[in-house]
Image (spheres, coloured by chain):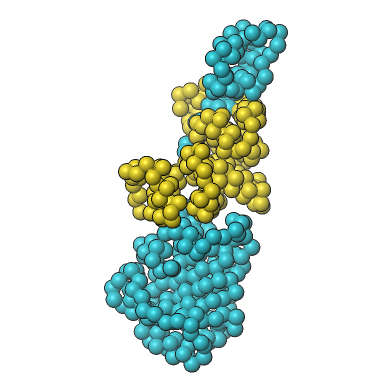
Amino acid sequence: MIPNEEHIEESRLSAYLDSELAPLEMRQVATHVAACKNCNERLSELLTGQAAVRSLPPSEMEVPPWGALKMRIDRGPTSRPSSTRKRFIPVAASVMLLSLLWVVYFSPTDLPESNNPNLNNVETIALDLGLYLQDLDHPSTESRFEKAYQVIPAAYESALRFVGIEEKSPLELVPSQFEVLEVSIVEYRDSSPAARIVYLGPSGRIVIFCQRQDAITSFSGFVADKVKVRDTSCTSVYCSQYRALSFETQAGAFTVVGSRIGSALDDLVNIILP
Amino acid sequence: MERKKSHTYSERALIDRAKRNDQAAFEELYIRNWDRMYRTAVRIIGNEHDAEEVVQNSFLRAFESLHRFDEKSSFTTWCFRITTNQCLDHIRKSERRRQYFESSTENIDQMLAENSDLSEQALLRKDLLPIVEYALGNLSPKIRTVVILKDQEELSYGEISSILNCPYGTIASRLARGRSEIAAQLTSYGITASYFQNL
């Protein structure tokens, strides 16, 4: 029995609201609250708090593709804390810049033209890569654009400076600490060929696809001349799009489709990286 | 990409297979549990992007430590334990922990100024949402977590106690404090329980 002069602890009132008390205690609290204005008011407050949270609409999101998680699982156990990612954003950005420049070199004619083709190319690619980088990392379409622009500026500015000055060969753009692990010719679903180049950079593994035949020939030529290739192989890539970039850093695994059609992304995420 | 849940296999069977490194079985567990983990993480962290990352990390952690899952609780409860730990860890380390959704007193004041009629009929769910989010965001992360697990996920005190590894009494007092603090903030805007009755 709860004496009328004693008020009920808030935690017990809250538990009463949730029917978490023993049956006898439930009856005792009910009797007391009916007679005690103070406890009745406090119970109403708790009810308000409960009702408010229950009124919140559930946040819904489509289950992200299993491939993105599978890729991380396949990479093996990691004790890396989630926040590590933030520390490697600059590294990831530099890797992305490198990838940007590769595309600028290899496929300038694939991109829309403007009065200032260099500017247009870089801008287009920067946005494109940024969108898809974020697309994998953050599938929410609502903030893709905003996030892309947050990630891109540094790479964009650097790329702009580069193309505004002079063209350089791709090999000159690759820092010496990037080791080429593998060069292979792969086939997309439409049977078009692509070069698949795998680097090992300071931030992790980078895979770059280049579709144009002349780019493949050119690239294979100077790679064969200047760097040691660990392995070559021929792989079918089930991607219907013409050009794709994929890179993996300590900050996370990124696959980037260098086209403006996002449907290829899932294919790539699921298949490209072993 | 539409993903349909398949409940052909029991959770127990899926866990057995997943423990034998059957990724398809773990994928099924992932699909079945994603929604609850995600919406819980969103409400604890207050940021959808971060929540998604945290939940992905949680499932990765779950897969890696599946061999240690003793099956004394359900897989969902175990996932909740990992996810809430990851959420609280994320908040501790995040520089943006103060940004809980876009809620701010300025936004709320503006909304209230635009709604001069504060009668229950005039305020709709969408109007109340930023106020409730703001109040929820002002709770300490530990208290907020208990409130979400109870009032959103409707878990029992026993389940929450198991997930957070806290005594029953601690859960009860955190929940009471959370509800009370939310009510106090809502009351300051003239909002009472009756506002939510017809939503």
Q: Position of residue A205 (x, y in %)?
A: 52, 72
Question: The C terminus of chain A appears in which quarter of the rendering?
Answer: bottom left
Question: The N terminus of chain A appears in which quarter of the rendering?
Answer: top right
Residue found 68% across the figure and 7% down from its top: A3
The hue in which chain B appears in the rendered picture of the protein:
yellow
Q: Position of residue B17 (x, y in %)?
A: 40, 50
Residue found 66% across the figure and 48% down from its top: B92
Give residue A8's quadrant in the image.
top right
Q: Position of residue B150 (x, y in %)?
A: 54, 31
Residue found 47% across the figure and 36% down from its top: A57
Decide: is A199 above or below A35.
Answer: below
The hue in which chain A appears in the rendered picture of the protein:
cyan
Decide: is B93 above or below A193.
Answer: above
Residue A6 or B97: which is nearer the viewer? A6
Residue A5 or A106: which is nearer the viewer? A5
Residue found 55% across the figure and 71% down from its top: A204
Q: Position of residue A264 (x, y in %)?
A: 36, 65
